[in-house]
Image (tube, rainbow, N blue to C red):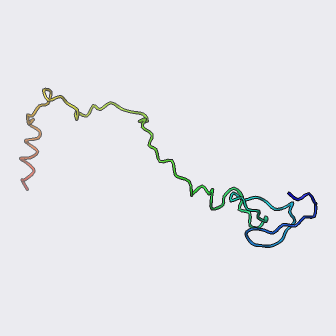
């Protein structure tokens, strides 16, 4: 590293010459000027270049028991037509 306070350095990106004390190292290990320096987000470590965390949360928030009759045992199921259903279908075709 240069020990002279007035040392000059060339930017690896734009090739302009700047004082060495204001040059910065990019994430590619190149010496760049303040104009070319992209900060924490350059092409190598930009947040959009990272793999997204798309894991599902297996925990069901605020669960409820199933009481809608969909999980009946075979012995508990009834196949009888009650009277209200028969009346509905018999009156459905009458205009």
Give residue 64's quadrant in the image: top left
88 or 76, which lies in front? 76
Q: Is residue 15 left or right of residue 66?
A: right
> Residue 30: horizontal and vertical position, in percent?
73, 62
The residue drawn where x is 39% and y is 33% is 63
The residue drawn where x is 23% and y is 32% is 71
Marker count (numbered)? 0
Give residue 66's quadrant in the image: top left
39 in relation to 66, above or below: below
The residue drawn where x is 47% and y is 48% is 54
> Residue 11: horizontal and vertical position, in percent?
78, 68
Q: Is residue 60 left or right of residue 23?
A: left
29 or 37, which lies in front? 29
Quarter of the image with the C terminus in it: bottom left
4 or 60, which lies in front? 4
62 in relation to 7, above or below: above
85 in relation to 51, above or below: above
73 in relation to 26, above or below: above
> Residue 29: horizontal and vertical position, in percent?
72, 58
Determine the residue located farthest toward the top in the rendered image.
Answer: 75
67 or 94, which lies in front? 67
Q: Is residue 27 left or right of residue 10?
A: left
The residue drawn where x is 66% and y is 58% is 41
Quarter of the image with the N terminus in it: bottom right
> Residue 89: horizontal and vertical position, in percent?
9, 46
């Amino acid at each position: 590293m240069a020990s002279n306070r007035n040392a000059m350095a060339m930017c690896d990106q734009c090739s302009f010459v700047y004082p060495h004390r204001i040059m910065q190292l990019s994430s590619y290990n190149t010496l760049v000027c303040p104009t070319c320096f992209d900060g924490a987000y350059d092409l190598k470590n930009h947040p959009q270049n990272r793999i997204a965390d798309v894991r599902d949360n297996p925990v069901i928030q605020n669960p409820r028991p199933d009481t809608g009759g969909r999980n009946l045992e075979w012995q508990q199921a009834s196949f009888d037509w009650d009277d209200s259903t028969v009346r509905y279908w018999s009156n459905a075709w009458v205009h």
